[in-house]
Image (spheres, grey):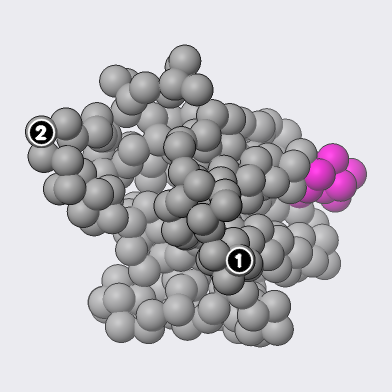
Amino acid sequence: MKSILITGASAGIGRATAEHFLAKGWCVGLLARSIAPLEEIAAGQVGAVVLPCDVTDASAVEAAFKQFMGKAGRLDVLFNNAGSFGTAAPIDELPLEAWRAAVDVNLNGMFYAARAAFAEMRAQSPQGGRIINNGSVSAHAPRENAVSYTVTKHAITGLTKALSLDGRSLDIACGQIDIGNARTALLEELAAKTPDNPPPMMDVRHVAEAVYSMATLPLEANVQFMTLMATKMPYIGRG
């Protein structure tokens, strides 16, 4: 049975992806802070491993990966997905604690998960695996009043490139999926605030399918960067 660990698996893109991989017969590590939704996803699923964990706690992340390895035996894929949009504000109005919180989740948390996955993939036999980082359209073109999200997602692009290079000789592939406007509860909530001008959205299942496509490639092949977004989203030229 192939295995994947998904951070931020309790809702949105993470949950949709977890459910897709479970339906495909994979062993799926469900990692998030809230245990109740993880247990709901895992109910009746033989391959589900519930891993309650805060990604901003490096020691807890390492322990969760060790727990998953004890259940699955190996780690084929990490979907490094957990993230937070944070506080919307111009830079001079952004509280410093909000900046630090965004960096802690979107950058430190993804670094901790990638670090733990890289170590397991390097040590296991046969060696290797795949790390898929969830970037964002904001890793290329920012939205207004989203400085903390934009900066941290740009940093994830650097993380992806560094992991690709450092993992090359170890059969550890790393790629990034940059997603724009997948229909999740969070985006629906934001859209409800502008009912006269709702943002274009796509079904979140397309993201799950794209991650599955990236995950099932042989390690000799890699999707380095993929941008998947609602077709009518103002990304090109949005500035």
Q: Which residue is found at the position 33% from the left and 63% from the top?
A: 11
- Report the magenta stretch's main SS: helix
- The foreground one among 225 and 66 is 225
Residue 189 visible? The answer is yes
In percent of width and height, residue 32 lies at 46, 74
Considering only vertical position in the picture, is 14 above or below 176?
A: below
Name the residue nearer the viewer: 80 or 191. Answer: 191
Question: Which residue corresponds to mark 1?
Answer: 96
Q: CA distance from mark 2 to mark 1?
A: 33 Å
Name the residue rendered at 64%, 80% in the picture: 57
Name the amino acid, label 1: Leu
Q: Earlier in the sequence, mark 2 or mark 1?
A: 1
Disc 2 vs disc 1: Cβ atoms closer than 8 Å?
A: no
Give the tally of numbered discs: 2
- Please give left or right for residue 57 compared with residue 215 in the image: right
**SS for dot 1:** helix
Residue type at numbered disc 2:
Asp
Of labels 2 and 1, the one closer to you: 1
Per the image, the residue denoted by label 2 is: 196
Q: Which residues are magenta?
A: 162-174
Above or below: residue 15 compared with residue 182: below
Residue 124 seen from this side: no
| Residue positioned 32% across, 41% down in the render | 182
Image: 192 above or below 45: above
